Amino acid sequence: MASTIDIDFPVHGLLPKKETGAASFLDKYPDHDGRNVLIAILDTGVDPGAPGLQVTSDGKPKIVDVIDTTGSGDCDTSTIVEVKDGEVTGLTGRILKIPDDWTNPSGQYHIGVKPAYDLFPRILKDRMTKDRREKKWDPPNRVALAEASRRLEEFDAKTPSPSQDEKLIREDLQAQIDILTNFDKKYSDCGPVYDCLVFFDGNTWRACVDTSEEGNLGECKLLASYREERQFATLSREDMMNYTVSIHNDGNVLEIVTNAGSHATHVACIAAGYFPDSPERNGVAPGAQVISIKIGDTRLGSMETGSSLVRAMIKVIEYKCDLVNYSYGEASNWPNSGRVCDILSEAVKKHGVIFVSSAGNNGPALSTVGCPGGTTDALIGVGAQVSPAMMSAEYSLREKLPCMQYTWSSRGPTHDGALGVCISAPGGAIASVPNWTLRGCQLMNGTSMSSPNACGCLGLVLSALKAMGVGYTPFSVKRALENTAVKVDNIEVFALGYGLIQVEKTMDYLVNFDKQKESKVQFTVITGCGKRGIYLREPRQLIKPSEFNVSIEPRFCDKDICQTEQEEKINFCMEMCFTCDAAWVQHPTHLELMNSSRTINIKIDPRGLQTGVHYTEVRGYDVSCIEKGAVVRLPVTVIIPQKVEDTLNSEMSYSNVSFKPGQIHRHFIQVPHGATVAVLKINSTDLEKKCRMLIHAIQVIPQCSYSSHEYEKFLTLSDNGQSTLTFKVTENRTLELCIAKWWANLGDVTLNYSLNFHGVQIDNMSPVYHGADGIMRYDVKATLKPEEISPSISLKTLCQPLKPTEYKIKCLNGPRDVLPNDRHIFALELTYSFHIDKSVDVFPDCTLLSSMLYESEYESQIWMLYDSNKQCLGTGDAYASKYTVKLEKGDYTIILQVRHEKKDQLEKLKDLSIVLNHKLQSSIALDVFNTWPKAINNKKMGSATIDKDDLYPIYIGPLPSDKIPKGAKPGYYLFCRIPKGAKPGHYLSGSLTLFKDELLSKPGSVQFKYVVTDSPKKNKNGGKDKSEKSIGKEKTKVEEYDEAVRDLKISWLSKLELDNPLYDELRKTYPDHLPLYMSRLQALDTSKDRSKKLVEIIDLAKVVSSKIDQNALLAYYGMKSDPRPEATVIKKDMDKQKEMLIEALVKLACAEADILMRENGGEMEEEEGALLPEVTLQDLNETYQTLQRWIDLNDDKMSQFSVLHAKANQQYGRALKLLLKQSEDKPTPDMDKKCMEMYKKLGWTHCENYASNWMLVKYPTSYRPF
């Protein structure tokens, strides 16, 4: 039978509005579609050119302003130049042609430079790098490589037996191939680099970004700050990245605003997109206007920072935004506090902003709500739901499933007992994304999508309330949501919150109860220790009934939100009644509440409750108006864990557990005393299909984020498949084992699974071993049952503590960093310097402030790492290990910025140390022994079986000095095995593994630190007797004095002017003293007038070489061994002579090469009246061959002359190879220019352009601004 074709596409499921009643509300009230409502989108930055974000439904500009509060788009334009002949020279060196139609009365321009890749998100940078390589690099490089290969093949065919000179020709040809091949492998595009101009046209500040990269400013768009003219431009047709500008600090800072990802544009379109030709694709509130505030830092891969959020709230308050949507968040160590949370709450409580935020995507386990959305009481946290219409339109599921919460949607309660999720909304949509993605729209899902859906719904409500003249506050709106959201069958309260948001019901509630006495009041409900609810889940809390004193306090709105008369506070009185639907909760029935804090007593008796989770609320109602719902709520959550009954095996089993799509089974287990590791074995009984499961295990530890004690694993089980998973557990605390079937994985499945506990503990669970401790004993114990152990220590990180070399505290300039009431923000900048000996991956860690963002007492911490040329190589924040930077040998600087509005808070951190973590290329094993004598004799232990509760000693000794990493110093520590170069002050960090079983070894390991001590000092005399000082008779004190005076005078030759008579005086007195001539030679060679002293350099170099018996030197170095008793002293003397000979010959050769190149029309300037000796290419080649007898031609001492020799022979490939090596060791602008000269000589224009562009990035004039 032929199937029918359904041509009615379910467009209402693409951007869901029916589920919340938004669609019916808009049908009923078409003019209340968000008009007169301003929504701030705090996110990655909205693309002003994206579809649906141009105008509102009533013709107003959709986007009011586009702001970047991260600083990632800032360009320093403090350099001021004046126009001359219609041109200025940009910081790139390009000539910038000023268009005739520009108006600039002063003639002064602020100039700066900005690499395009600083403005691009990673995905766009990757695309542009690939495109630019394919178009600009690969074709010319293939041609050049093919030509070089052809020439080498021809040479080899013509010259089967090359002479010495011909070998150099072949080396040159091979060098060209090597260079081009290596470039191809290591190609790294720095991207376009733009000159930026800012000027004042008499009325406003304007900016132009030279996107032509040729100085043709007439081809580039001239922009004012977006808020003034609402214009944007596109960087190029290739990238399609739209940008706007804002200009600060009288033209000294240009803020170039792009987006750090596609997230914000999608979010904005959900909340307020407007498509006049396709209204079915409209956002929830198409009449609302939007402010785009970029808080996702491009430098950090779109991570938010505290400073960007504080700046964002300054803008939100300045613009008097009605709503904020915040689809961001992190796990926090404690809820509802911290500098950033306080600033966010201040905007709500003092300025009337309604703040809607995602609850998080870290479910399905309980207590996984993110900060700030799920943990901050001033905010409205939103969970994510998926409806049947969404399943069909967005996900193309074969079957329609019932409405459910997404599996990953975070769940409450918070660690302090608050519900966490306030409401839910549809958590997926197909909506607009930025133009640079080269697609018009995209499917995204997450609480990031449910939050703007709910925010759009509130936009409709506020639009209606404003039109009707009905007052509201953030608190009355939140109460309306809690009392009108609709419950959904089979969705737990921890995921759903108070229900699915309903637009019309929320509006009706606010209209009907507008004049109620609590409309201007927020009720704070606090239990002991400042907690916002009652949350009992640990065994010790469940033994007996508990009583809680709960304070209830009304807090009136700030005067900036609504005018509250003193009489209202005086007259406030509410007679309250309390109710609770749980028999195990006892509470008072009534309370008279006035404008002060009142306390009631709540008693919880968890005895008799079944295993599992139990939730209820103590709700307070105004007896005068019960129909408005609860005005006060106290959440109560009690979790009753199972005990492990099988104490012999410490195992729990679950058989024939069935799962439907989206179904979750939670098991709460009291982790046995002594347990350290859990093993989950799971298998499917289905013989026909595979299933996708999410395994989530959580333990709640005081003042620790859920992520610190979390295990999460997506698992695909094949038909009749099985899997074994292991994770760390903490003894005597409740473990939630949450097993969920992925919501979109169709079909039912039945699983069998078991959880088995193991326990091996060490008497110090965070061992730190100091290299001077000798042999250290630790006792290991099997705590649950006999266990097989095989202790091993692996050190993987060298940790280098750094102290600041400089600090400064400055008051940040400009309105971006001034909070309401003129509260200026201060920034502490700490500078750290360090040296790297060899290539290594590092990540800096400000340990005092690590892993804290919203809950930190400081506004933010961000660091930038620079090389010796001030090029920024990497940026990081509080989450240290996310930001690894690869460094080569050289000197580096880290600048760390911490911000706060109180200067004295920053003063406390002026000596703040950080740790620079070096990732070791291979881990270091620290041997473990089972007896003290075996530790002495270095006989490592193997495996052993220990009985339950038995103590088994293990011993650890110091690392041999040859295993300590190069560069490690005393006080450094290692996370297991000491790398070469570790020095006192450093430490090694790694893990101590106890279990033999590989499955148990990782979760059962503990962190181990090894502090490095001083290495044994080597005898500088090579072990010889100190009496072997010199050959012949000993010197008298007078002779020693005369030599010391002579040497002192010689040391001053390089510091005095060349015409000082000291050299001539010394030469007469010491005519055969070689160091005298060498000192003079060095002074001549380093002189600024070197080009005028070439003759003297040549003559003096010949004098030095003539005074050294070269035959005697050759004879000495030809000896296999020297049996003479004074051999050490002789060798030292011969080595000195050899070094002086080599240096003299190199300086001679370089001077000859300079003369030769001058005669051949090289780059050197002509000397007036100088009579230079004639130098031929043959002379140069002979010197080159002479040097071959004494030094390896690849030695660094030869590099300068080798380059000159190659250039003189027009062997530019060989010269370039040497220059590139020098540049790698120590990059400088001069070295890069020399390389560019060689590219030009070789005809490699693509390499010349490549190097020229990189120079603009590698050598900035100042550090990148924060």
Image (tube, helix red, strand yellow):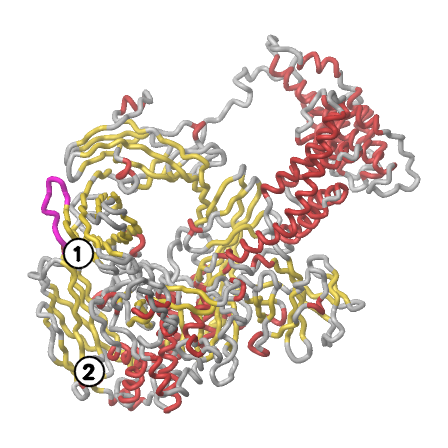
Query: Where does the magenta region start and end?
Result: 641-651
The residue that label 2 is drawn on is 593
Give residue 1137's position: percent from left, percent from top. 70, 21
Give residue 822's position: percent from left, percent from top. 48, 75
Q: Is residue 255 above or below residue 566?
A: above
Give residue 396's position: percent from left, percent from top. 35, 63
Q: Is residue 228 above or below residue 215?
A: below
Q: Residue furthest right?
A: 1169
From this viewpoint, is residue 1166 visible? yes
Query: Within the image, what quadrant is residue 517 found in?
Result: bottom left
Say few, some or many: other residues with alpha carbon within 10 Å of mark 2 (under 14 / 14 to 19 / 20 or more).
some
Circle 1/circle 2 CB separation < 8 Å? no
Q: Assign the magenta stretch its main secondary structure.
A: loop
Asked whether residue 68 is drawn in magenta, I would say: no
Q: Residue furthest top?
A: 1123
Whether residue 179 sits left or right of residue 835 in the image: it is right
User: Is label 1 or label 2 in front?
Assistant: 1
The residue that label 1 is drawn on is 538
Q: Secondary structure at mark 1?
A: loop
Say few, some or many: other residues with alpha carbon within 10 Å of mark 1 (under 14 / 14 to 19 / 20 or more).
many
Asked whether residue 642 is drawn in magenta, I would say: yes
Whether residue 384 sits left or right of residue 540 in the image: it is right
Q: Secondary structure at mark 2?
A: strand
